[in-house]
Amino acid sequence: MGRGEGNLKLFRIAFWLCLIAIGAVVIGYSISRRAAADQVFAFEVHRARAEAQRIQSDVVFFSSSIVPTRASFAGLLHNLGINSETVARVTATVTPVFDLRHVRAGNQVSVGRSVLGELREIRYRIDPDRMLRIAPRGNDFHAEIEPIPSTTETTGVVGQIHGSLFEGVVASGEKPELAMRLADIFGWDLDFYTDPRPGDTFRLVVEKKKLLNGELASYGRILAAEYDNHGHVYRAVLFHDPSGIAAYYTPDGKSMKKAFLHSPLKFAAPITSHFSAARFHPILKEYRPHLGIDYGAPAGTPVQTIGDGRVIFAGPKGGAGNLIEIQHSNGYDTYYMHLSRILVHTGQRVEQGERIGLVGMTGLATGPHLDFRIERHGEFLNFERLPLPPSEPVAKNDWNEFAAARDRALPLFPPLPATLAQNRPSTVPAEKSPASQ
């Protein structure tokens, strides 16, 4: 074998050795990659199992229900899918912590379950500040009342009337409760069935208690309120009366409260018959005096006393049907007739705005309505034309404190939309102190 052939043979051997080495490296790399992939896969499987276990143990899905009228807590839990044995154990656990007879219609009950359907928690919102929590603990349950974390912020609300006050408040993004509160503030000056007109505006500065998720828990104090009734602007500022009780005053210190409310219905119905010396009676078919005002309202509409006083009669009385007579100060008596239900009794003290009965059509009545009458020293008066005497203004020694509260609250009114702000005062004029009035 010549020298050339030997070199060729050595080259071939080297080639194959190199190829074998490369193959070994490739195989080794492939094995290491497979091992790494197996490790990654095993880790992913472990993590997936851990995540599934975490979901099963920690993730809770809640279903909620509003407590209906006259519903028991046990019955509500049954309706939410909890079996009778568990309900009995839950109620036995709760009884020492919270009296379930105080469960209120309209509050929320929530039942939390795992993804596998296991009971994890029951929540009942007692009020805006407290939550009843019930959860399994071992083979039994544990119940406790916890505070609901919340924050309070002062914010402005602005809206316009197109239909009713309720509709205007809801259209502004607020709850109907705020309409009731607004009606209470201006109830001595405005009848919120007959007085509002399309285009009226309202503004409020109100405290809102919010949960940590941003949900509105409840409204706090209304610090200032404004209602523009077709160009007649009413404003109110929160302060306190001489006894320290919260009360509303005009920016110049006059009490918003009058001795009598503007209407015996919180949201008074349209007047269907006015005070008259000679009205044709629809049942008796004769002309006779009508010494009161008829408000046409659906049966069951709440009736309120227009002022503080004492019930001197409550019961059926001939053509007046179910009647309540209330004696007030300064010689005034008021009468509330044709009621479907009486909610007070003779001799009872009542406060202004207190619900005393429900509209009906008892006695001589062709349909549900309230016949309201007011009398002074034996003479019946036309309530529509009766000036309502005011309460006491801000006391002189409280004026500086009141002025400071007013000057803090009024600038917080939100601006009116540009289309509504024309021809409106941009600021409240300087107010005189009681000493200069």
Image (cartoon, rainbow, N blue to C red):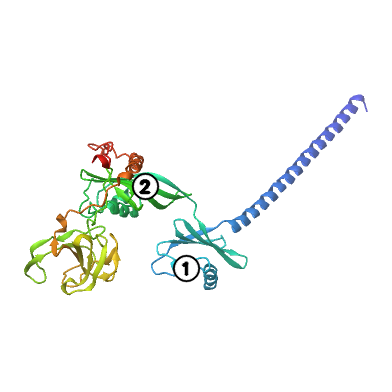
The answer to whether 436 appears left or right of 412 in the picture is: left
Asked where in the image residue 286 lies, by quadrant, the reply is bottom left
* Separation of residues labelled 2 and 1 (CA atoms): 33 Å
Q: Residues within 10 Å of mark 2 (few under 14, many from 20)?
A: many
**Image coords of residue 20 (percent x, y):** 82, 37
The answer to whether 237 appears left or right of 390 in the picture is: right
Q: Which residue corresponds to the image point at 26% horizontal and 58% vertical from the top-left?
A: 266
Q: Which residue corresponds to the image point at 40% horizontal and 62% vertical from the top-left?
A: 106
Mark 2: secondary structure? strand
Callout 2 amino acid: Val
Out of 142 and 214, give the one closest to the viewer: 142
Going from N to C along the chain, the mark reached first, 2 or 1, is 1
Q: Residues within 10 Å of mark 1 (few under 14, many from 20)?
A: some
The answer to whether 194 appears left or right of 208 in the picture is: left
Does the rendering let one see residue 326? yes
Q: Which residue is label 2 attached to?
A: 206
Q: Which residue is label 1 attached to?
A: 100
- Asked if 91 appears above or below 423 in the picture, the reply is below
**Image coords of residue 324 (percent x, y):** 23, 68
Does the rendering let one see residue 301? no
Out of 24 and 4, give the one closest to the viewer: 24
